[in-house]
Image (cartoon, rainbow, N blue to C red):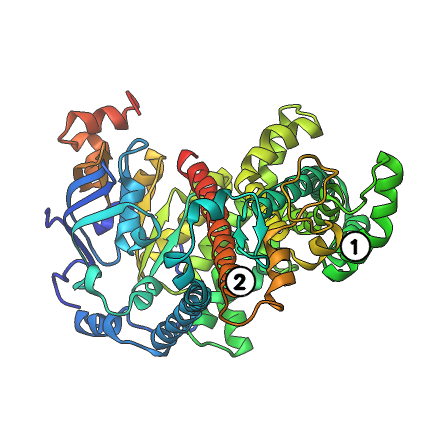
Amino acid sequence: MVTEPPPLVSVRGLSIHYGDKVALQGVDLDIKTNEIFGIIGPANAGKTSFLRALNRMDEFVPGMQVLGDITFAGRDVRTVRNLYALRKRIGVVFPLPVGLPLSIYDNVALSPRLSGITKHAQLDEIVERCLRRAALWDEVKDRLKGLGSLLSGGQQQRLTIARALSQDPELLLLDEFSIAVDPVTTMRIEEVLKELRQELTIVLVTNLVQQARRLADRTSFFLGGLCVEIAPTEALFSGGAREQSTVDYLEGRFG
Amino acid sequence: MTSDPNKDSAGPPPKPASPQPASPGPLPLRHAGHHEWATALDHRDRTWWFDCIARLAVLGGGLSAILFIGAIFVFIASQGIDFALHHLNWLDFLFGKRWEPTVEPPEYGALPLIMGTCWITGVAMIIAVPLAFGAAIYIGEFARGRQREWLKILIELLAAIPSVVWGVIGLQVMKPIIQHVFGVQVGLNVLNAGIILGLMAAPIITTIAEDALKAVPETYREAAEALGASRWQVIWKVVLPHARPGLSAAVLLGIGRAFGETIAVLMASGHRLMIPESVFDSAATITATIAAELGEAAHGSEHYQVLFVLGLLLFGITFGINLTADWIVRGRRSRA
């Protein structure tokens, strides 16, 4: 490894509009390889829009307009020739669980199969590993052939996480992943995320300020479409926040 | 950007990652340099090319639909356009009350046909829509399991009955019934054709309306039922409003079906070329007139050409119906 590796994701002057509405304005930030990058902020701060822009999901949203530069591994995501290869390397977990109408096994095996893995032993191994990491294995190991969409909300959320891991992403975008998951399971998943940091880079959008504190190496505070500040998490939480609005938010005075 | 490394602030992971052999992930790019990354993102692999080809193939499918509709329009127009532009008095055509293409001098007033079509379609919809919506709501919201499956199969069977059979039913069954029940002389009339057409259109409306109801997410019903809404309130306040674009489409497709139906109407309507004044008058429709007269008209004659102008008119009306349907669905979406 080089002493100062270039950032995995580099964002410059990113603005996002939905028609006339501005969701994000002039965001500059870098996400380093193998870090957990936390994003906190009240509703409507542009957090989800930011994630959407990262792997070019704006194409699914009519009227969403992305301006500015985003580079992923040194490549401008706007001009990447094989968009599917880009998305394959960026895993996403949405806030509401999306269990695809497939069996639990097939949900997790879908992405490996899409990239051409057909051997059963290999698929079995991936499925078990990913389900274990998402803290779901013990609950579903006896009914892997059951429909994924019949699981409970929290289980589906963990299934979604397992599925995102199964594509073996370089960058994992977590959008309020713990919204439907009970606290104990959340802690188990958080442990896994800490381990995963050694392998991949994680962007963690969360409404739980303490979750960002527990997990993130650096945390950024978004407010009203602006990236107010970015700082090492410990510094931010131990009184090192520069901006008054960040302090207010962290202390729960608004939001 | 701060250059402060802060790796140690969050502490090392509590336990080493569970013993795993080197992960068999698809592409172990993680430790490669950025150059390899960039190349990988630009590499057009098999998946990409397949996607590209499939996209072109379905584009071809979509274009062919446009091509066919265009070709049909061009054919109809080419047969009738000369007459329509140079010899036909459009005012007389649209508002003239006499359709007498074979007498001298011929009269090409299509109003009786237009009105006949409207009357019969109107009666058909008055009969078909309540029946079909009732059936769709019962199947979609109340029937369960076996019963539901059987009902669906029966309704689809109903849609498969050939239209000439419906015509025979109109001639042989409905005619005496109407004469007897209403005490009228003529049993082949707007009412007869409307009932027959209504029964023909109902299965189609039912099937599409039921699909629209089924597309309403179950969670909406649960959320409303959790508020203590009765079954009917749930249907009326939540399910039907959400399904409205689909239900409108169902009705308009039913209208299209009734509009385009030819042989059953020809048999059941009495085919009288006059503007009907009540549902007990016989009437003629545009489609039935084309079917009845095209065989007798000499190829290229005025009569032949004016029948194609009728075809153009039919084309225009259908186009209008579809545009309206589109507009309804769209308007609903933009408001939602």
**Residue at image point 56% right, 43% down:** B97
Q: Position of residue B237 (x, y in %)?
A: 60, 28
Horizontal relation, residue A146 to residue A155: left or right = right
Q: Please report, as a chain letter, where disc 1 is located.
A: B
Q: Chain of mark 2?
A: B
Question: From the viewer's perspective, is B261 left or right of A169?
Answer: right
Using a 10 Å C-alpha cutoff, classify the residue at mark 2 as few (fewer than 14 neighbours), some (14 to 19) or many (20 or more).
Answer: many
Asked which secondary structure carries label 1, the reply is helix
Look at the image and tell me in which quarter the N terminus of chain A lies: bottom left
Cα gap from disc 1 to disc 2, whole angstroms: 43 Å
Question: Which mark, residue B154?
Answer: 1
Where does the image place residue B221, in percent across and percent down from the top left? Answer: 62, 35
| Residue nearer the viewer, A96 or A37 | A96
Front-lying residue, A32 or B218: B218
Label 2 secondary element: helix
Residue beneath disc 2: B303
For residue B118, above or below residue A122: above
Is residue B145 visible in the rendered image? The answer is: yes
What amino acid does circle 2 point to?
His
Identify the residue at image location x=69%, y=51%. B271
Instruction: Provide residue B32's location: percent of width, then percent of height.
Output: 23, 72
